[in-house]
Amino acid sequence: MFYNLVTNMIETRLGEFEEVILLLVGILGEGAYAYRIAEEFKSQTGRTVSIGATHSTLDRLETKGFLKSEMGSATAERGGRRKRIFTITALGKRVLKESRDFKVSLWEQYPAFKVNFN
Amino acid sequence: MKQPPQLAQKILQNFLRRELAEEVLGDLEEKFYSTIKTKSVLRARLNYWYQVFQYLRPFALKKFKNNANQTDMLQSYLKIGWRNIFRDSSYSIINISGLALGMAVALLIGLWVYDELSFNTSFKHHKRIAAVYHHIEFGEDKLTVGDVSPPIGPELKTSIAELESVSIATWPKEQILDYNNSPTTVTGLFVEPAFAEIFSLEMHAGSAIALKEIHSVLLSQSTAEKMIGTDAVGKTVRLNNRDNIVVAGVYKDFPTNSEFANIHMLLPLNYYVAMGEVTAQQMTNWEDLNFQCFVLLNEEASLASVQPKIKSTLFEKGSSDIKAIKPEGFLLPMSRWHLYNEYKNGVPIETKANLIWMLAMVGAFVLLLACINFMNLSTARSERRAREVGVRKVMGSFRSQLINQFLSESLMVVIASFAIAMLLVWFSLPWFNTLTDKQILLPWNNIYFIVASALFIITTGLLAGSYPAFYLSGFNPVKVLKGTFKVGEWVKRPRQVLVVFQFTVSVVLVLCTGVVFQQIQHAKNRPVGFLREGVFFVPIRTQDLALANYNSVRADVLATGYFKNVAKSFFPITGSMSADASVTWQGKDPAFRPLIAMNSCSHDFPSTNGFEFVAGRDFSRDFSTDSTAVIVNEMAAKLLGDDVIGKKINFASGIEREVVGVIKDQVRWSPFTNQSPHMYFIKYEEYGVLTFRLAEGVSAQTALASVKEILKKYDTAAPFDYKFVNEDYDRQFKNEERIGKLATVFATLATIISGIGLLGLSAFAASQRTKEIGIRKVLGASVFQIWKLLSQDFMKLIVLALIIALPLGYYLANTWLMQYEYRTEISWLVFALVGIAAMVLMLVTVSHQSLKAANTNPVKTLKSD
């Protein structure tokens, strides 16, 4: 299932929105900070999301241990302010992989699509 | 202006956690500038605002305070407050009980005032209901009455379109209903079917349509259940031992605080009309002013627009007799029926409403006194806690925590007082209801009541706690702890003002109470001009008794030997009389039409009631001419002019009568008003009352039993009702005695509350000066000198209070007395007594504390430092 082996009190389930954000962080690599992620989310899904909502999810994923972050470089259009760059942790990668495997196994049990899949 | 909105940035920085500020502001700015490239600046700015609000999420918000710490502090406040209450328990008892008493009084008065003001508001259409009233003139006098003649009902209904319904009704009258041979006296009205619609009569069973019938009746639920049972509809009852009628419906009792609270039976006016020729003729007689008329305005109509249409209806339709009294019609809206229905010379007098407002003021003042006390005592005592404040501050307490500490302490005390006040009200409500003749309940579930109570608790608590909370918490701890700190003189001044105010209010209340009782006694001592002891009367309500031969009844009664005399009359000696302006006599100016009160009676009426003659003689059966004789009182004699005895008087009925005697003026109207000219004339009416005068040494019980027995012979169905004249007469003092009792209670409580306040303050003053007293004693001051020292400060205040209160009390009492025509002179004795009593009370209260301080061994007070 989506459960992680880490046995502390932190909630470790991965929600749908969280999963997408986590993947986007991986896709963006060095350029993964809240504003960029929100923009990427929009261009990939066609749905808008506020920076605040994205940021809140990133913060939660970091608390769960799927992401880590550090302050990056500053640019002029940000008024000289630095950005916080997020990167996926090993735990985050494992959770993503588990999630994909679980879904694939579900798809394989679905007879109507079995043919197409193979 | 291609910049992100500054205000939004500021707001964001206000709530955003500091460590997030840089990255978030950066992200939002980047977003802003990239939006500008494709969209308008306005859109970008709006979007910036949107993004800012999107950051209102728990993860991003500043942690303003640690919640766990706050509940801990709250617990600490409560614990310390609780300990403080018990540490100085005598002070707490004084403080809490004083405030609780004040609150209880204010609550009771508040409930009463609310009940009075909400009178008659339970009817669905109460805003559109009105009664037809007329100003009428008799010579100099202008009366205002709700009496109309029956034809005005249909006339108004057809001529005024704004009236939705109109109902003529009789005045309330006791009738006898007999079910299964157990007769009961029930007060009822004869009404038209529209009555049910006007007053939105709520039916419990059956239908109000029955008011269209003749031989049917609607009963109130309580009466129906008492008389018949739960299945009253369809049962047959006998009315006044005359006709059998059917109970066609049972209506829910009218609310107790409404005009018709005592109306338990509604009969169709059709029945009244069908009773006989006389009653049938009444319906078309414009002169017969013996009915009332209720109207319901339609939704669009305004009272002001209908008023002029009603003004001259009666005048135009009436005969010359009616025109002579110049009736001027108007509508009295239902909201004014209870408190504003009295007029004098055509102008409304607001005695009843004034009384309500007066009592409301008293309640507010008593509450104010209690609150002042509470604040006084709280602040006085809080100065002793200056050192505690100093220590707390040194230990690192914030000012806000000290403020919270003091405020929560005073709130605790107020809440405790309120709980006690509620208990007091709960227990005293039955007594209060008896006293005020009401049925008030505590409105536990009324949202306004709860909100008002909560607001009151919070206001009082905050006000009383505000001085220590904001003033003491500002102390410099170094000064306080070094002992160089002294509370300024300025805090003493308002406290003195408050003591003076308190005593002024109490003294004024006591004074007014004294005057109320003086006035009641004065009216009770008024010579009434007839016998009150050992006389009772029995109303004749049934046809059998009315038609019985009076002389044989009389013979039967006298034969028992229990009675000195017996008489029959249309009105009892303590009842109202009919008023007549139509009598004439020789030499009378035709334009002069004084209103004369009339009572027809049998020959024995004056002797049975012990009239006091000043001229002429009593009626006598020995003179056959006495069947047209008249006895007048002194006021009437004055109207008739010289040589009253033997004067011929012409009555409207065409009979010429002769004056045979003049009696002393009697108190036939309220003992508080001027009396009027009276005439008693011989006429043996069918209905009315029988008056019995006991022979000496006969017990009332034996006499009543024998009368009951005799009357049973003439009428088997009538229940036996009787009234003793002295009791019936005393009923007229009920209102004034009620005011007196209420005033006594409130004045006593106000005085107690002031006394409590004084006790607390004197104790405080003495405790503040313990060292001074110790040193004085060491230096040789006597106990008396110290007592004088401590008492004179308060003495000055009391004298000042008396100087203000005595003239003010005189003025208020005098204003109250002016409403009575027959009133007492305010005696200065009352004022002197109250003044002395106030002094003595104050001295006793203060001395208790000063003597205690003066008698303390100085060694004890001086060694403590």
Image (cartoon, rainbow, N blue to C red):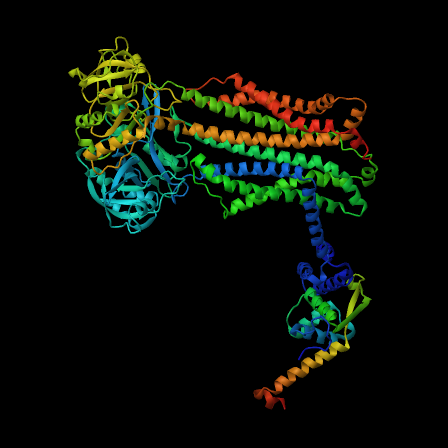
In-image side of B508 versus B591 (left or right): right
Q: Nearer the viewer, residue B14 or B563?
A: B563
In-image side of B593 versus B507 (left or right): left
Residue furthest out toward the left: B624
Quarter holding residue B711: top left
Quarter holding residue B116: top left
Residue furthest out toward the front: B697
Task: Establish if A70 lies above or below B475.
Answer: below
Residue B173 screen position, x and y as percent:
29, 35
Residue B64 visible? The answer is no
Residue furthest out toward the top: B642
Q: Residue at x 20, y 31 (%)?
A: B546
Task: Establish if B114 lies above or below A105.
Answer: above
Q: Quadrant of the N terminus of chain B?
A: bottom right
Quarter holding residue B728: top left
Residue B500 screen position, x and y as percent:
63, 26
Residue B241 visible? The answer is yes
In-image side of B61 versus B559 (left or right): right
Q: Nearer the viewer, residue B593 or B680?
A: B680
Residue A104 screen position, x and y as percent:
65, 84
Q: Residue at x 59, y 20 (%)?
A: B836
**Numbered disc total:** 0
Q: Nearer the viewer, residue B247 or A37?
A: B247
Q: Residue at x 82, y 33 (%)?
A: B863
Residue B544 screen position, x and y as percent:
19, 34
Q: Quadrant of the C terminus of chain B?
A: top right
